[in-house]
Amino acid sequence: MVEAISLSKSFGPTVALQDVSFTVGKGEIVGFLGPNGAGKTTTMRILTGYIPASGGEARIAGFDVFDQPMEVKRRVGYLPESPPLYPELSVGEYLKFVAELRGVRGRACSLRVGAVMEQIGLKGWEGRILGSLSKGYRQRVGLAQALLHDPPVLILDEPTSGLDPTQMVGIRALIRDLAADHTVILSTHVLSEVETLCPRAVVIGRGRMLAQGTLAELKAHAKRGSWTLIEVQGITARDLADADGVEQIEPIPTTLQSDGWTSYRVTSRIDVREALIKRVHAANGRVRAVEARMATLEEAFVDIVGEEGVTLGRRPDPPPADGVQA
């Protein structure tokens, strides 16, 4: 449904994107992750036809973004980080205006605006002036304008930016509902949002591809990867370090117990639970809990971005020229 093939973009001497490739299948919702200046917004603007690429290819629903821009725009709904609203218009006036720009006119326009407003939770707000709305409701109107022409693909850039926790919950629920009938690319800095909404994610940094895959794959390929939690009594970290397969061991300070039980984080490349238990018994210690854990998405993100790593299975590209990236 969405294909980006070796996308590159330069603004004069500044390289914003370099050889970025990924695909999003029909009905998928994919998180698009990266630190500030990674090139996320630049990529989204290229996919929506807002700006041209300097190199590479992009296709939406089989149509070339550069050669068939109008066909692409008919199939894409775009919510930029700051929705393009006219503060002096009412909600109804604005959505009718956008619908007409999209080619929806007459009775069909009124019906479509009404249906989208009900879907987004704006029913009864037709007369409210956009400039008087809270940030959360402006985001709802932004989502509504992206949906008016019933596009199969939604590209959402930081849809919950600046919202309070209650507003975030509402917008996330809307996006989850929309994902049932749309292909969605979701850019966000909120990793919990990705874990809630996205089975898969793409990570970029300094305009380059760093990793992509399911959340479990990203966590597994993080530097910290999987690890083991063990809670013991009467045994030291040095004792546990002798177990076969253990690469590193460190106490977890937040779980230190006054009754002598201590929790350790054990890093290894294999399942070491049985070896750890045998080592505890051999040292005349006691074990109360042992379980396999996986790196959190936050830990995986820090490892992937912090290393300026590579797309899984690829060698790193040379770094682009320094400069401000969108």
Image (cartoon, rainbow, N blue to C red):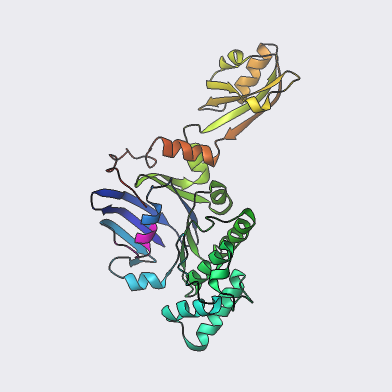
Residue at 57% x, 47% y is 192
Percent of width and height locating residue 188: 49, 52
- The residue at the far top in this view is 283
Q: Looking at the picture, tell me which residue is in the foreground, 17 or 81.
A: 81
Percent of width and height locating residue 219: 51, 39
Rendered position, 316 above or below 58 = above
Percent of width and height locating residue 224: 50, 31
Q: Is residue 51 magenta?
A: yes
- State how many labels appear: 0
Percent of width and height locating residue 18: 30, 48
Rendered position, 231 above or below 41 = above
Residue at 67% x, 27% y is 255
Quarter of the rendering occupied by the N terminus: bottom left
Rendered position, 255 above or below 162 = above
User: Would residue 92 appear left or right of 48 to someone viewing this image?
Assistant: right
User: Would residue 261 appear left or right of 20 to someone viewing this image?
Assistant: right
Q: Looking at the picture, tell me which residue is in the foreground, 205 or 202.
A: 205
Residue at 35% x, 63% y is 59
Q: Is residue 259 magenta?
A: no
User: Would residue 247 appear left or right of 76 to someone viewing this image?
Assistant: right
Point out the stretch of residues depicted in magenta.
44-52
Quarter assignment of residue 54: bottom left
Q: Looking at the picture, tell me which residue is in the foreground, 89 or 256.
A: 89
Quarter assignment of residue 23: bottom left
